[in-house]
Image (cartoon, helix red, strand yellow):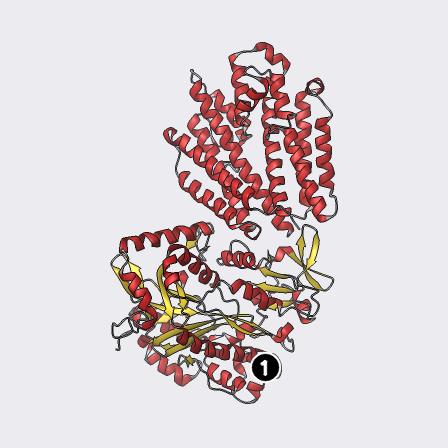
Amino acid sequence: MLGKTAGGLFWMYRYLERAENITRIVETGQRIALTRNQENDDEWASVLQTASVDLGYFEKHDELSSDLVIDWMLRDKDNPSSVMSAVTAARNNARQVRTALTHEVWEAMNGCWMRLRDALKRKVNERDLPHVLGLIRQRTALVRGATHGTLLRNDIYDFARIGTFLERADNTGRILDVKYYVLLPSAAAVGSQLDNVQWETILRSVSGESGIRMVYGHNPSPRDIAAFLILDGRMPRSLYFCAKKLQDNLGYLAHDYGSTATSHDLAVQLGKQMKERSIDEIFDGGLHEYIQDILIALGELSRQIEVDYRFYE
Amino acid sequence: MTKTYDEMWGTEDALRAPYSQFGQWFEGEDPARLRAKQREAEEVFRLTGITFNVYGQAAAEERLIPFDIVPRIISGAEWKKLTKGIEQRVRAINAFLHDIYHRQEIVRAGRLPAEMIKNNDAYLPEMVGVTPPGGVYTHIVGIDLVRTGDDDFYVLEDNARTPSGVSYMLENRETMYKMFPELFSQTKVQPVSQYPRSLLRSLSACAPASAEGTPTVAVLTPGSYNSAYFEHAFLADQMGVELVEGSDLRVVDGRVAMRTTQGYKPIDVIYRRIDDDFIDPLTFNPESALGVPGIMDVYRAGNIAIANAPGTGIADDKAIYSYMPEIVEFYTGEKAILQNVPTWRCNDPESLKYVLDNLPELVVKEVHGSGGYGMLIGPTASKKEIAEFRKKLEAKPGNYIAQPTLSLSTVPIMTKAGLAPRHVDLRPFVLVSPNGVDITPGGLTRVALKKGSLVVNSSQGGGTKDTWVLED
């Protein structure tokens, strides 16, 4: 496989994952805005922060409103992480690696882009928002479905998966990074409604609200939430789950190619680092520092993969 | 003026035999359903991504070439005759290319003026004395044909550089299968879907001696912003080979190699979809970032096959075109089976005078132009356009050739008001390898969608049709 193709697959699936994650965060913001009584635009600031798109937003806008935030996150071309920007980038990468994809995957990706381009041509008004969010979910899910159902399980699939899980780990990591303070034991004591909103934001943003109920019941503690999102190997968006998948897929590549790359060692290390410490030990050592270390490690891993597999000249 | 020949109705409004089954089927169809199908087809094309970028327009704009559902139908017997002529012509073109890059017997014999080659930008001195692997120059050729009567086919143009459009031939058929399966169970149409396999086989057969085992073939594209990128990706995908760009390639140990996830891997045959000038910045255009520095050295050492060979453009040059009857005869010893359109070379003073005197009746083309740009169609041009063109022609006569305006045949298209005739041409695709010449039955039918228009180019309002060759 061409190094460029590996890179194209990696980025196609990173952007696809990003589009889904941003959608999920917008959905969360919308949901919380509807279920809280008082009008509070601070929630939208928190939504922007959760998606790590707050800096760009405040460069462009002086005021904060749900309309502007939703527009920024769904369709603004100036925002490289808006859903439309991410889907367009995913589609352009797919076009680049067209020969590595099956017809089904390409058509699902191209169809996703075509439908969203139409749906996001104009500002989405409040009434249409649920429909549009649903459309994004469906269309991206179709690409994922075609991927699982038709892609050959060789290096093509490995790079697709590596892109997916790096982006996902990064997303979960960033959410934890900006919200870590509401998970600290001191915050639990406060137990205010604000904190519950924050917890809900975190859980919904990673589609973890029903999963955690199955594992911890209705009143999870912040410690439970942290354990669930960092260490739980059953939770498909937890940091450990993603690290494990990265390790697996880099392992398949090493096996296929007959040689182990540095990036594989990094992924193994990352998994080990998580396995070795319990959630209490993580809190003792400092949750924030721990998350930051992981984000840095993910960045390094991403760069090493680029080098190991010759994405660029 | 005689009535235009229609491929469905002839000149006498009597359904021609190749269309008899289609005509019957069409009679029984509800026009509303057919129009709905037409829209459905466009949706399929958009989803598949069969789009092209128009030069000079916003890069992001991907346009669709309109597709018309009424097929262009050719009988098996008609096709057989055509293929004989095409094969003869293509063999002559390859012999001609070998000759002009070696002994130039045709010039020595006085059948072609030396200045036709000497002063021609398409002639590459770098190719002199080079014999491509397998001796093949034009691995892929598209011969543009037009028809003016039952038995009258003319070659309008030979495309010996990098003919495009074959993906439309294939996708048009796939779309027709999807939309009208019943038509194909009634009428036996010769398949075209073997083309990618034939192409790979043909290219592999031209691999240089340095190839080990199964030759590694790759398609070289200028990149995803190129107007024909879809086709490049499509062909690479269908052949199961890598689609590479210049930035993926470099010369390693005397071979052209591509950067894979496991290091550089040598390539044996490169199907390049970039122009001669951009192939090698060390040999040709030094500004080119699309090609591979040093590839020409590898080529001259016989360690890679390039399809088509550099320098083949000399054979499809419009000035050389006028010599094609002589060229065919010189190399095959036979009269050309396919007719050339009578052509006036404007560098000849007498011809120039005739052309200037008769501009309103003639088609005048730039010698090196393509895509229907830079040409004058006398009968449809305004007085002002003709006057402007006259100035250009007088300033640089050697730049132009002129031909009579042919009454191109028509094939009906589906319009809101039912069937309506539109002018068409035909580009069959021809593969050449040391094992022989392979012509896919059919080709690409381009159709001028505007009533009365003779310009079929997709960049100027042309569409395409599925082309059927019947099993007789």
Camera-side residue of B312 and A129: A129
- Residue furthest bottom as drawn: B109
Which quarter of the rendered picture does the C terminus of chain B lie within? bottom left
Instruction: Look at mark 1 in the image and give the residue it sits on.
Output: B99
Which quarter of the rendered picture does the N terminus of chain B lie within? bottom left
- Crowd rating for badge 1 (residues with CA inside 10 Å; few <14, some 14–19, many 20+): some
Q: Percent from the top left, x then y, of residue A79?
A: 51, 36
Camera-side residue of A15 and B81: B81
Q: Percent from the top left, x then y, of residue B242?
A: 60, 56
Where residue B51 sits, quadrant-wise, is bottom left
**Figure disc tally:** 1
Classify A263 as above or below A172: below
Circle 1: residue type: Asp
Where residue B413 sits, quadrant-wise, is bottom left
- Residue furthest front as drawn: B185
Q: Percent from the top left, x then y, of residue A294?
A: 67, 29
User: Quick check: B17 left or right of A280?
Assistant: left
Residue at 50% x, 67% y is B163
Residue B129 visible at all: yes
Q: Percent from the top left, x then y, of residue B237?
A: 55, 56
The chain letter for the residue carrying disc 1 is: B
Residue A64 visible at all: no
> In terms of secondary structure, where does tag 1 sit?
helix
Classify A176 as above or below B448: above
User: Quick check: A304 left or right of A191?
Assistant: right
Camera-side residue of B35 and A149: A149
